[in-house]
Amino acid sequence: MDLKAAFDEILAAPMATTSFWKDLFLRYVFHTATSSDLLADDLLFYVKLPIVDGEVADLPAEDLLIVRRRTEPNAIPSDEESLIINWRETFYLNTVVQLNFQLMVAVCTRRSVGTEVALEAHRHVAKRVYASPNMTRMDQKGHDYAVSYPLIYFIVEDFEDAFANIIIHENEYLCVEVSVNFQVPDQQGSVVASTSVSQKLNIPTQQTPDRPMKVTIFQGAVNWQALLNTFQKQQVSTLPFTRAAASSSGDRVEYIMMRGPGDKGHTQVAVSVPPAASASGDLGASDSTDSLRQGLMRGWARLQQTVQGRYEPIAQLRTQLTFVNIHWTSIINDIMDVYYGKYNPSGDPKFTTSRPAPETPLAAINTARHLAQARCQEMAAASEK
């Protein structure tokens, strides 16, 4: 997909119509899919306008999207179906889903370099992840999927195996980054670079000889003490009356949510104590032969420790990332910023291209409702003829 060409057309059509967005989707998304795109996922997602019974109204999450397979005869909605499609968001959503994203998780320490403070990676895992408008609860059995749009989820199904060796100790940081890779030269023909955790940590990235550009769309870090404090508090929050989740290895697991800087996205981490990491085995998962009474006693003991401000000593924590979520507008904004520079309402001459105001969740909602209102009026007028 020629993302730069598509964005250039968008910038040249500030008053874009529904037909413009539909045509853009057909030319840049539907008709230009590569074989690698089809191997990755042949699904197409159509975002519906907020219309119920001919009136503007909020749609339930399960009704937000129409999903089709690219190979199906009805892959493109009929003319009648097209009337309720938000082609603008449909273009952006399918663009995001087709991009090549990489997740980087690293265990780091801080060190001073002159007057600068840098992060040094000791262990890291990099893997490709896929954007999806659906979510699943990794902390629950069954992993049922539900529509998450307008949040885009990057789910790690094999998180237990992928991050089995991501273990954090005192004075260390857990760093998380999601980035997207594609090629775009600047005006002089050189590749535009971006600042990222992996670059700061001097971690090699999977790049082809033509040096694709890397745009960081999520970046965050949490220190050992903050992670430990949250883990210990969650350990006793539901005890002694319930048993916590356990990993496939039997370790007791707490699922901890972390917010990105500036509330930009969230990530969930499955945190557990590796075997022999604590002073006693009390914090591990209950054996299948344990009686309810034994489980309640251990839970009560942990609850007493919490009330008294004391916790079982823990030397290390295993941290396994399960997902990252980001609003679609944030992803589009980050890519636009790299292509055209940050939004520049003052007309600073250092930006040669004037880009539109950044997308925001609220603006996206208002635009969708405006389009829905116009569509309702069109349908009402057509029914009167």
Image (cartoon, helix red, strand yellow):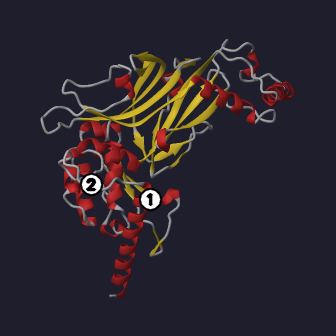
Camera-side residue: 341 or 346?
346
Element type at mark 1? helix
Dot 2 falls on a residue whose secondary structure is: loop
Residue placed under numbered mark 1 in the picture: 362
Return the disc, 1 or 2, that comes first in the chain's sequence: 2
Distance, label 1 to label 2, CA atoms, is 23 Å
Amino acid type at circle 2 is Ser
328 sits left or right of 143 in the view: left
- Look at 23% across and 59% down and name the residue there: 23
Q: Is residue 172 above or below residue 343?
A: above
Q: Is residue 69 visible?
A: no
Q: Residue furthest bottom?
A: 385
Residue drawn at x 49%, y 49% as measured from the top left:
148
Q: Quadrant of the C terminus?
A: bottom left
Q: Is 258 placed above or below 105 here?
A: below
Residue 51 at what x, y percent from top left?
A: 45, 69
Q: Nearer the viewer, residue 153 or 62?
A: 153
The x and y percentages for residue 53 are: 48, 74
Q: Give amino acid for label 1.
A: Leu
Residue 270, x across and y down, in percent: 58, 29
Which residue was labeled with disc 2? 346
